[in-house]
Amino acid sequence: MTTAGAPWTHELAQRLVSVGYREVPVELAGDPTVRAFRRSDFRVSWVFSRLHTFVIVRQTPSAQGRDVAGFSQASLRWAIDHKGGLLRGLQSGVIAYAVTGCDAADQSALDVAARRPDKHFAAFELPVLVHPASANAATYTGTISWGLVYQQFFGEQQRLIIGDMHGGTMPASAKSRSIGVLLAIVLPLILANLVVTVVWLSTSR
């Protein structure tokens, strides 16, 4: 474990627990420094869906692009395997923040942390790269089109992870909330109309 990263990891754990995360056991790539935290949220504005959020944290002396990408992919697979609840995609999704704390990082590591996340079925991965000694952090700061209703929440979790470090996060989106609320209102009406139609057709024969 890097001495520079250890205090930051402890502070991050305190912030996560204070807003409803709980630490869970994790075995990932045989790395004893990895820690995992999770929470589960259900919101009407997310079109009546539940999101399982995981923050997986590790310490490493140095980081390169392939390391950050590999850890992010492994973290998402682990989160999907351990989320529980309904099957992924049935009003249920997963977001994994793979947080790499390091003493040094090359440009490829920064590029991987900042690039647009890969698309997955009902799952999201958002790597975060932090350099505790300089209090700098890198993660995706753009917008998303798939999973737009979650964008504000995603940004909030990024800001929670970064804390007082320097670095941008995904922007809050009033549009995402409006779309979520609209869908939450419209979809039940469509389903209700469908049920009425089916009942009417079955009784009119």
Image (cartoon, helix red, strand yellow):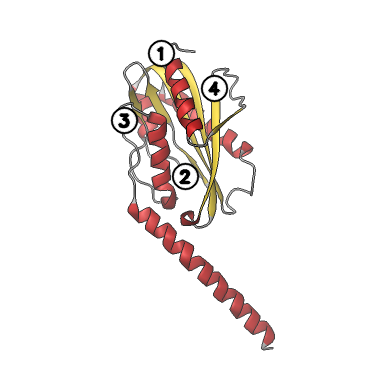
Q: Residue at x 40, y 59 (%)?
A: 179
Disc 2 marks a residue whose amino acid type is Lys
* Mark 2 vs 4, N-terminal side: 4
Furthest residue toward front: 18
Q: Is residue 58 left or right of residue 159?
A: right
Q: Secondary structure at mark 3?
A: loop
Q: Quadrant of residue 116?
A: top left
Q: Secondary structure at mark 1?
A: loop
Q: Is residue 76 left or right of residue 153?
A: right
Q: Quadrant of residue 142?
A: top left
| Residue at mark 4 | 34
Q: Secondary structure at mark 2?
A: loop
Disc 1 marks a residue whose amino acid type is Ala
Above-or-below relation of 122 to 202: above
Give the Cα separation between the discs numbered 4 and 3. Answer: 23 Å
The disc placed on residue 119 is: 2
Above-or-below relation of 112 to 41: above
Callout 3–callout 1 Cβ contact below 8 Å: no
The disc placed on residue 4 is: 1
* Mark 2 vs 3, N-terminal side: 2
Give the Cα separation between the discs numbered 1 and 2. Answer: 33 Å
Q: Nearer the viewer, mark 1 or mark 2?
A: 1
Give the Cα separation between the discs numbered 2 and 4. Answer: 25 Å
In front of the other: 192 or 72: 192
Q: Residue at x 47, y 21 (%)?
A: 10
The disc placed on residue 167 is: 3
Q: Residue at x 38, y 29 (%)?
A: 162
